[in-house]
Image (cartoon, rainbow, N blue to C red):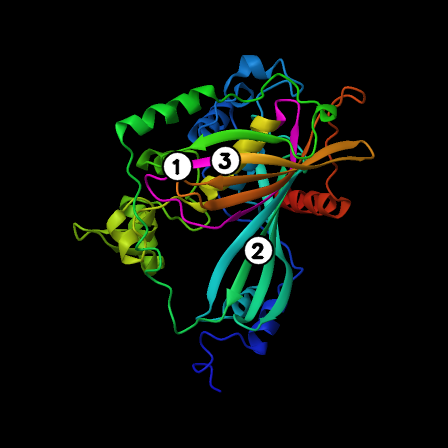
């Protein structure tokens, strides 16, 4: 078969090219919206996702906690990155890997975070990243797929690993039958005035656990927590997701003026003409209902990352100021359209004691007004103990900690 004949198919040559980069780490050169944290950036991020926990937004309160200052919600690590100088993977190897799987479909299947250190005002966050694993799977119905996990290691200016993110993407052969339009018949939400009163009442009844400790001894498997509401989704939610810092790197989805013109010259497929005939980002499916309908959806819809933030909010409300989210694995299953109301409920699945760690495994699900689960998180949180004292933060793996020191040392040598 010719190269052209294999477009949209997974070949052994594709897999071999991709395997060349598995196990290779490189410094992340990307400059996110946030590079160094401040009291203001932390507060604005928290409020941008609807979280008014005083630990994040009130320095006077935060100074009375075990942390001694404002700290960032752990999930904020997703949108913080300062450019890290150093040697990248050889250009030719990167070029061959980028040429693999042409015409195939890529699905972001889910992500898993682990966190090791709090992030304080004044902390600069860097990262190194690379493909951690590749697995080929054969499916009787779905054909051949390739599962690739990419690892991002986030560390601060002291070379302390604060968090590790593993993103799973699935490469699938493109099918001739398209599913475009399968969502078009979903009825858009509409709320009568009488519906809105109970929604606001539920919001006003919510409160973070905050300063009241949730002790490990008081939690039992089968216990539920929540609800935490999010919505009905409005344009302001999308605006505040971007105001919180999302969407500006590594590929700018949001740009204007001369910056947008330069991006169009570099990535013309990321832009199309709007109703007025002007060029605008393809990312406007998240606020432009007409474009959303053209791609088969009934309404504009949120970013999946927005619901990752919301799931984390439910976890930190459960933990209280003295708890710590150790791990969060989340998956986005359905669209969240303008007008949709998401209600998040949590369930304790198990309670564990391992060495100095006293942990609780929980599951949080986001369910819309149609009764559909649109996203979920499986998480592990550490809680303080009446008998054993405060949470002990986990050490990052020694291998990752050593690599962080190496990368930061080289960065400083080049700065």
In the displayed orientation, state which residue is furthest to the bottom: 1
223 left or right of 303 in image? right
Q: Is residue 325 above or below residue 135?
A: above
| Residue 324 magenta | yes
Structural distance between the alpha carbons of marks 2 and 1: 27 Å
Q: Nearer the viewer, residue 60 or 339?
A: 339
Q: Nearer the viewer, residue 340 or 169?
A: 340
Structural distance between the alpha carbons of marks 3 and 2: 24 Å
- Residue segment shown in magenta: 319-344
Secondary structure, mark 1, is: loop
Front position among marks 2 and 1: 1
- Residue 2: % across, % down: 47, 85
| Residue 177 magenta | no
In the displayed orientation, state which residue is furthest to the right: 355
Q: Is residue 110 above or below residue 50?
A: below
Earlier sequence position, callout 2 versus callout 1: 2
Whether residue 123 is visible here, answered yes or no, is no
Residue 89 falls in which quadrant of the image?
A: bottom right
Residue 344: mark in rendering: 3
Residue density around tag 2, few if under 14, some if 14–19, many if 20 or more, within 10 Å: many
């Amino acid at each position: 078969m010719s190269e052209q004949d294999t477009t949209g198919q997974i070949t052994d040559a594709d897999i071999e090219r991709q395997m060349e980069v598995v196990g290779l780490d490189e410094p992340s050169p990307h400059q996110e919206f946030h590079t160094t944290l401040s009291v203001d950036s932390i507060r604005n991020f928290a409020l941008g996702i609807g979280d008014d926990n005083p630990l994040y937004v009130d320095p006077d309160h935060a100074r009375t906690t075990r942390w001694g200052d404002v700290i960032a919600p752990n999930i904020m690590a997703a949108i913080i990155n300062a450019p890290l100088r150093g040697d990248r993977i050889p250009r030719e190897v990167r070029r061959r890997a980028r040429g693999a799987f042409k015409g195939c479909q890529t699905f972001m299947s889910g992500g898993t975070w682990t966190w090791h250190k709090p992030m304080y005002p004044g902390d600069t966050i860097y990262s190194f990243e690379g493909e951690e694993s590749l697995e080929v799977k054969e499916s009787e119905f779905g054909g051949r797929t390739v599962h690739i996990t990419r690892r991002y290691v986030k560390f601060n200016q002291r070379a302390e690993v604060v968090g590790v993110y593993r993103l799973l993407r699935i490469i699938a052969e493109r099918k001739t039958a398209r599913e475009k339009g399968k969502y078009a018949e979903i009825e858009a939400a509409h709320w009568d005035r009488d519906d809105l009163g109970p929604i606001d009442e539920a919001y006003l009844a919510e409160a973070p656990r905050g300063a009241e400790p949730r002790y490990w001894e008081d939690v039992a498997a089968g216990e539920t927590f929540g609800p935490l509401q999010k919505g009905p989704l409005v344009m302001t939610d999308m605006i505040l997701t971007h105001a919180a810092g999302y969407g500006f790197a590594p590929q700018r989805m949001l740009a204007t003026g001369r910056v947008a013109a330069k991006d169009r010259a570099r990535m013309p497929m990321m832009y199309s003409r709007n109703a007025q005939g002007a060029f605008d980002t393809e990312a406007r499916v998240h606020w432009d209902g007409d474009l959303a309908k053209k791609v088969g959806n009934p309404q504009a819809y949120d970013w999946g990352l927005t619901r990752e933030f919301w799931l984390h909010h439910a976890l930190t409300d459960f933990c209280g100021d003295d708890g710590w989210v150790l791990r969060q694995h989340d998956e986005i299953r359905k669209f969240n359209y303008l007008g949709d109301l998401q209600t998040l409920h949590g369930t304790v699945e198990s309670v564990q004691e391992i060495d100095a760690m006293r942990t609780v495994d929980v599951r949080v699900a986001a369910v819309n007004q149609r009764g559909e689960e649109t996203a979920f998180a499986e998480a592990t949180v550490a809680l303080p103990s009446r008998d054993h004292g405060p949470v002990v933060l986990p050490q990052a793996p020694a291998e990752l900690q050593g690599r962080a020191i190496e990368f930061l040392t080289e960065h400083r040598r080049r700065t």
